[in-house]
Image (spheres, grey):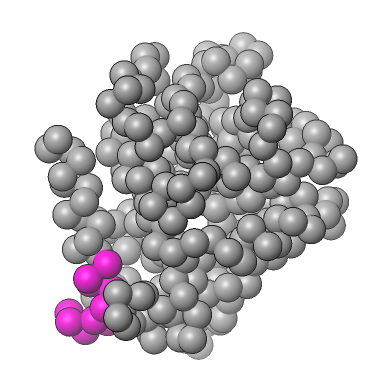
């Protein structure tokens, strides 16, 4: 299994923490970090990372002109398809490839995801699994515009159709995302809507995966029991700390008391991150 992420220097510590959490629960996994920068760090300092690669070394035609179409965090969407293709070509001994956002923390083994990868070309995670507890559908409409599936966690498997999937993914992002009015920071999300009808795809409907501010309304039974985080009756697998100083904190304060277990996970992540940044 190969796990990858995309980061700039601004998210470098978060990417390191993600890598450490992956190796803690999957010691045999290889972790590849793609840097959207102009230089590489000293690999020997980070033994839990198998390899660093620069975004401009992924084989992207007209790299600078292509990347100029994207602003801010959109660079992740611009690179993801190319990164998957690069990894599939270079790491021919690997069959499972998992992309996780740099601000993700793996909390327990990704058992269900790996099981689904054994019979699918691609595994996607929805933004949410239950309707929002409101009388209007504003959030649902927003997700329809931005994409039903969350692009921060995607698994692919080496199958006969993988090359066709990646070529399609690269083409639509290259041709359309730069001129797209929707999609926000992750313009590839809208195109993920098409994948279940075009390719052999599976949808991971497990409440313990890719938990973040977009689906935290479903996690009211988020508890810590004997050092094991659970969501209802299911184990928490990974938590996405994107926007952890804005949207995530606002959602936590609105839904949870200040002694709730979710704040312990927050403190664990924050402390580990500060240690990496200061070290």
Q: Quadrant of the N terminus?
A: top right
Residue at x 19% of width, y 63% of height: 267
Q: Quadrant of residue 49?
A: top left
- The answer to whether residue 66 is above or below residue 131 is above
Question: In the shown orientation, is residue 122 left or right of residue 2?
Answer: right
Residue at x 51% of width, y 45% of height: 28
Picture coordinates of residue 3, whole percent (x, y): 53, 42
Q: Quadrant of residue 97?
A: top right
User: Does the rendering let one see residue 72?
Assistant: no
Name of the residue lying farthest toward the left: 278
Name of the residue lying farthest toward the front: 28
Residue at x 14% of width, y 35% of height: 279
- Most foreground residue, 197 or 27: 27
- The answer to whether residue 184 is above or below residue 247 is above
- The answer to whether residue 107 is above or below residue 166 is below
The range drawn in magenta is: 255-265
Asked if residue 19 is among those painted magenta in the image, a careful observer would answer: no
Question: In the shown orientation, is residue 109 left or right of residue 58?
Answer: left
Residue at x 63% of width, y 18% of height: 60
- Most foreground residue, 231 or 192: 231
Picture coordinates of residue 33, whole percent (x, y): 45, 32
Picture coordinates of residue 137, whole percent (x, y): 55, 77
- The answer to whether residue 218 is above or below residue 179 is below
User: Does the rendering let one see residue 270?
Assistant: yes
């Amino acid at each position: 299994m190969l796990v990858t992420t995309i980061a700039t220097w601004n998210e470098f510590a978060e990417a390191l923490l993600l890598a450490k959490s992956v190796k803690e629960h999957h010691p045999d996994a290889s972790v590849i970090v793609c840097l959207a920068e102009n230089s590489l760090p000293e690999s020997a300092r980070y033994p839990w990372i198998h390899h660093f690669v620069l975004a401009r070394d992924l084989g992207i035609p007209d790299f600078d002109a292509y990347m100029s179409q994207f602003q801010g965090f959109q660079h992740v969407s611009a690179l993801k398809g190319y990164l998957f293709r690069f990894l599939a070509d270079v790491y021919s001994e690997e069959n499972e490839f998992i992309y996780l956002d740099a601000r993700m923390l793996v909390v327990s083994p990704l058992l269900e995801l790996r099981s689904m990868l054994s019979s699918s070309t691609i595994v996607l995670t929805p933004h949410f699994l239950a309707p929002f507890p409101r009388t209007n559908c504003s959030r649902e409409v927003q997700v329809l515009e931005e994409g039903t599936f969350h692009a921060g966690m995607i698994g692919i498997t080496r199958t006969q159709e993988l090359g066709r999937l990646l070529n399609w993914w690269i083409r639509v992002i290259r041709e359309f995302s730069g001129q797209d009015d929707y999609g926000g920071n992750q313009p590839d999300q809208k195109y993920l809507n098409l994948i279940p009808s075009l390719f052999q795809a599976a949808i991971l409907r497990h409440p313990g995966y890719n938990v973040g501010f977009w689906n935290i309304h479903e996690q009211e039974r988020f508890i810590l029991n004997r050092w094991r985080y659970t969501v209802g009756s299911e184990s928490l697998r990974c938590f996405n700390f994107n926007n952890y100083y804005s949207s995530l904190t606002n959602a936590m304060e609105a839904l949870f008391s200040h002694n709730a277990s979710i704040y312990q996970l927050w403190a664990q992540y924050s402390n580990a991150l500060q240690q990496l940044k200061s070290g």
